[in-house]
Image: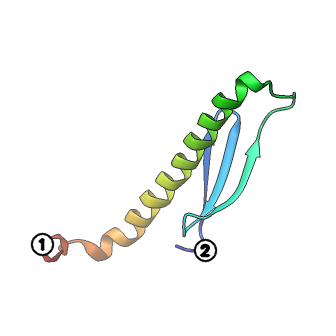
Amino acid sequence: LEKSTYEGTSSLVTVIINGKKEVKSVKLNIEEEISKEDIEMLEDMIMLAMNDAVKKADNDKEKRLGKYSQGLTGLM
């Protein structure tokens, strides 16, 4: 899982994280200069893209390890 990568997207932003949930890259998909008024919106898009990537990592972990933890819920 740690060697896997996950891509999160939100409109103008793409974030890639690894299985340890470390950010490996952030890409802004814009071609023109951003005005100061758009910075807050861009910050929100980065946050959404990062959350999307983390969610994908969590879902993949659950999918891959779920078969090993079935029946163990009563023990935890």
Does the residue at mark 1 contact the one at mark 2 (Cβ under 8 Å)? no
**Sequence order check, earlier mark of 1 and 2:** 2
Task: Work out which quarter of the rendered image holds the C terminus and state it.
Answer: bottom left
Quadrant of residue 34 within the rendered picture? top right
| SS class, disc 1 | helix
Q: Quadrant of residue 17?
A: bottom right
The CA distance from mark 1 to mark 2 is 30 Å
Residue where numbered disc 2 is placed? 3
Instruction: Tell me what residue is drawn at x 37 percent, y 72 percent.
Output: 65
27 sits to left or right of 76: right
Name, please, the residue furthest toward the right: 32
Residue at point 65% right, 30% down?
40
| Location of residue 71 in the rendering, given as x and y in whole percent from the top left corner | 17, 73
Q: Residues within 10 Å of mark 1 (few under 14, many from 20)?
A: few
Q: Nearer the viewer, residue 20 or 71?
A: 20
Would you call the spot at circle 2 few (<14 residues within 10 Å), some (14-19), or many (20 or more)? Answer: few
Q: Amino acid at mark 1?
A: Gly
Q: Residue at x 19, y 75 (%)?
A: 72
Q: Is residue 27 left or right of residue 16?
A: right
| Closer to the camera in the image, 14 or 65 | 14
Reading the image, the residue beneath label 1 is: 74
Q: Is residue 12 above or below residue 18?
A: above
Secondary element under disc 2, as helix, strand or loop, is: loop
* Residue at 27% in and 74% down: 69
